[in-house]
Amino acid sequence: MADDTYNIQSLTLHGFRAFLEPKTFDFSQKRCLALFAPNGKGKSSLIDSLEFMFSEDGTLERLGKRTINNQAGVAALAHNLAVEKNITPKVSIAFKRGKLVLNGMREAGPGERLQPDCATTVGSHFTVSPIIRGHALRQFVENHKPEQRYTDVANWLQLGPLVDIQKNLRALRQQVKAMAIDTSALQELNNQLAKETDNLVTSWEVDKVLEYVNKEVIAPLDDTLELDELDSLNANYIEVANRTEAEATRLGLANLRHIRATAASLFNETEDEETNEIKISGLIPVFEAAVADLKKTKLTEASERSKAKNAVFQDIWKVAEPLFAEDTESPEICPICTTPLIDTAAGGEAGIRVHLHTHLLELADYAAAKKAYDDATEAARLAHNQLIAALPGLPTLLGDDHEALKLNLVDYLTDIAAWSDGDVPESGALTALIEALLVDLDENITAIVNKQGDHTYVKAKDKIDQLLKLQTKFSLAVRTKCELEKLSDALIKQATFISTKIREKVQALLDTLQAPMNNIYRQIQGEYAAPIRLELPAEDDANQQRLNLVIDFAANRMAVQPSGYLSDSQIHSVALALRMTAIKQFNKAAPIMALDDIVTSYDADHRRAIASLIATEFSSCQTIVVSHDERFFIYLKDQLEAKYWQFMRIVNFDPQIGPLFADHKVTDDMIEARWGAGVTAANEIRQAEEEWLLRICREFAVSIRIRPLERPYSYDRSELASAIAGFVNEKGLKPKLVAGVNNGFLMSLQKGEIENFGSHFSDAPYGDGSIGDEKARWAEFKEFQNQFVCPRCERRKFKRPHGLAKPICAYRNCEAQFEFVAADAAEEET
C-alpha cells in the first residue's frame, strides 16, 4: 500500500452496538480482515462502527436520528447494558499514512457525538462511500431514479459543481419560461377592467375601452364630447377635468344631497304614504320633546317627594314590616319607645300594619318618579349637546340666497347655547325656513337626476383616471411578458450549449468507469455476460441530469432496464460492480472498502468468483469483509494472501461481553479485575478452564463423542476434561498431582465444584461463592496448566499430526515429543 494513502491502523469498539466489553481490531500487521459469524452474533457491528465514525451526524442510516416508524434512533448505538455497567459507549480509531498516525474517538451516547478530526480528514477523501451492504445494493439499480443516479455518479466523478450549474440553469430556465407563459397578471388586470366597466368590457382592447368611456361615462353628461384616445394629454380629457373643477365650485348633485341631509338632521317633516300621518324628526324636535318630558317628570318627582316627606324613616319601616306581618306574632310593646301597642296613635297591631303598608307604597312611587326625572334630565342634556354640535354645520353650506335662514340659525344657536333650564327657545320661524329649504333642494335634486341621472363630471373623471392606471399596468405587463419570452429563448440557447459541454465531459468520464465496471461484472457473471452501459439522454433532450443504466440483453432487447431482464444475482452483480469500481477509481487517497454480507444471492461458483475478484482486482485496497456465509469465508481464506489478510470467526455471543471470537480468551487481568471490584469471578474461571481444555484437546487431537445435531460444536467442560484425561491415560502420560487436590486434577475439572458453587444458584444458606475459594482454585488450575510445556524448548503449543501417537511441540525447529514436566520447573519458566 502506498505511503501517500490512508489506511486504518486499529479500530476499537466499547459499549457500541453488540460489543459491550472492549474489542480491538488491529490492522498494523495485516491490513485486511475477513470475519465470519452466524447471523445475530454481532458481526455487522464492525461495519456499523465505520459508518458511525464517518457519519457527519454520528448515526447509522438504517437507525435514523430518532425513534420513528421502524427506525430505532441513536439510542440503539449503545449496548443495552452500557448504562447498567457504567460503560461509555464509544468507537476509537487510528489511521496511518506513511509515518503519520492520526487517532480519534467518538462517543455513541445520546449527547453530542462530535466527529474526531482524523475521521473528518480521512472521510473528506471518500468520493464514494467505502461501505457496501448487501441489502442496499439493489437500490441503485432498481429503486433510484435516473436523476438520483446521475447526481450520485457525477459526485463520484467529482463533477458536483457542474451538476449544480446544470441544475441551477435548468431551474432558472424553467422559472423564466413559467413566468413568460404566465397570464395570471393579465387576467387579474382584465378582472379589474370588468369590475370598472360593469362587465361591459372584459379584456383590454383600446377601441372597446374608448367606446365604453364615450358612451357610458361622458355621453350622459354631454353627448357632443368624446375622447379619441385614452391619454391624459388629450384635449377632451382636459375638458372633462375643467368641467370637474367647475362642478366642484357650484352646487352639483352631490353637494345638494349633502346640504339636504344636513338640514334634515335638524328638522324634517315627512308624510307616511299609507296612513298620511305627518312625522316630524330631527335634532330640534328631539330636543324640544326631551325638555317637555323633563318638565313633566320634574313635577311628578316634586309631588311624590311631598307624599314621602318622612322618607327618613324608610329603613325603620322596612325593618318593622316583618315584625307586624299577618302570619307572625307581633310584640305587645313598641320595641323603640316601650309604649304598649294599644296605647299608641295607631291603636294596636292592625293599625300599625296599615300605617306601615301606606308609607312603604308612598316611598316606592317616589323612587319611580325620581328615576324618571333623572333619566329625562340626562336625555335633555344629551339632546342639547347634539343640537349645539349640529347647528353650526348648515350655515357654512348655504349660499347668499339663504341669508334669512343663516341669520335665524345663528340666533337660534345663541339661544340654545344659553339655555340651561326652563322653556326652550322659539324655533317655529327657523323650522319653517328649514322646511322651505328642503322643498327647494328636493326640486333641484329631482331636476338634475331627471337630466343626467347619477352621473357627474367628478365621477366621470375618476372612472377615466382608473382606466388610465389600468392602461399603464397593461402596458407594463405586456412589455414584461415580451422581455421574459426573449430572456427564456436566450436562456434555452445558453443552457443547451453549457449542458452539451458538460454532457461531453460527463460521458467521457463515464466511459472510463464503464470499462472496469464491465470487467468486474464479467468476472462475477462470466465472460459472456451482457455488457452494462451508463448512458446519458440524447443530446437534444432538455433534461440532461439523468443517467440511464441499461444492458443489451439480446439482439432484439437492446438498451433495456436490468431489473426487467436480469436474475436476482445479476442485478446484485451490476450494483456491486459499479460500487466497487467507483471505490477503486475515486477513493484513491483512502482506498478502504468494507463489505457487509454481499454474497447473499449468489451460488457457490459466484462466491468463489467474488473471492477471486477481491484477491486480484483489489489487492491495493484495505478491505474488510464480514459474512455469515461460511463457504464464502473459506474461499477467501483459500485465495487471499495470508501476509495481508487476517481471518477471524465469531463462535458465540455473550450478552455480558459481546461477540466471542474463536481466539477469545479470558485473561488473568479480567479475573483479577473482578476480584479487585469485590465480585465473584466464577464464570470467568469456568470459561477460562473451558477455553484451555478446548485448545489442549484440539492440539492433542483427542477423540470426542460426536455431538447431537442441535449442538454440533458445543462441548462443556466435563466432556473436554474427560476426553483429555482418557487420552493421557491411554498414552501413559501422567500429570503430577496438584497440591491440595487428592484426586487427579482433570477429574476435579470435570466436576468443577468450586466454580459451580460461585456461579450457579444454590438453595443452601450462605450459598454465595467465596472469592477466597475462587483464588485458591485459580492457583491450583494455573499449577496444573503449567505442566503442559515442551520439555525441550518450554513452549506451550502442541500438535499431533496424523499417524503420531503422542503430541509434539508445534514449533517447527523443535517438535519434541510431549512429556509432563514437574510443576516447579514450569513455574520457573513462567
Image (spheres, helix red, strand yellow):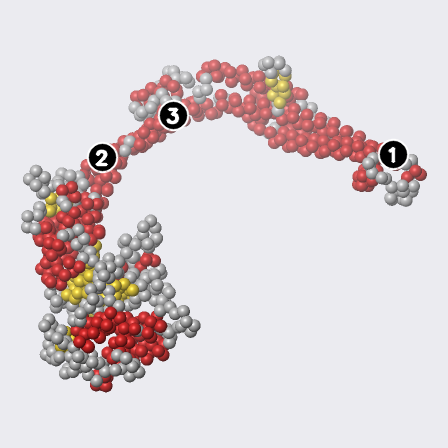
Q: What residue type is labelled 3?
A: Glu
Of mark 3 and mark 2, the one earlier in the sequence is 3
3 and 2 marks in contact (CB < 8 Å) = no
The structure residue drawn at horizontal position 12% and vertical position 58%, both measured from the top left corner, is 611
Q: Position of residue 264 (x, y in %)?
A: 58, 23
Residue sitting nearer the eye, 741 or 323: 741
The residue to which callout 3 is attached is 196
Of mark 2 and mark 1, the one earlier in the sequence is 1
Query: Which quadrant of the rendered structure holds the C terminus?
Result: bottom left
Label 3: few (<14), some or many (≥20) within 10 Å? some
Quadrant in the rendering for residue 233: top left
Secondary structure beneath dot 1 equals: helix
Query: Which quadrant of the rendered structure holds the N terminus?
Result: bottom left
Q: Which amino acid does label 2 sit on?
A: Glu
What's the distance in space between the residues labelled 3 and 2, CA to CA? Answer: 30 Å
Q: Position of residue 387 (x, y in %)?
A: 63, 29
Residue sitting nearer the eye, 120 or 731: 731
Label 2: few (<14), some or many (≥20) within 10 Å? some
Q: Is residue 484 above or below residue 759?
A: above
The structure residue drawn at horizontal position 37% and vertical position 74%, both measured from the top left corner, is 769
The residue to which callout 1 is attached is 350
Residue that sits furthest to the front in the current view: 730
Q: Position of residue 452 (x, y in %)?
A: 45, 17
The structure residue drawn at horizontal position 72% and vertical position 29%, both measured from the top left corner, is 294
Please state which of the two labelled residues, at mark 3 or mark 1, is closer to the viewer.
1
The residue to which callout 2 is attached is 485
What's the distance in space between the residues labelled 2 and 1, CA to CA? Answer: 108 Å
Label 1: few (<14), some or many (≥20) within 10 Å? some
Of mark 3 and mark 1, the one earlier in the sequence is 3
Q: What residue type is labelled 1?
A: Ala
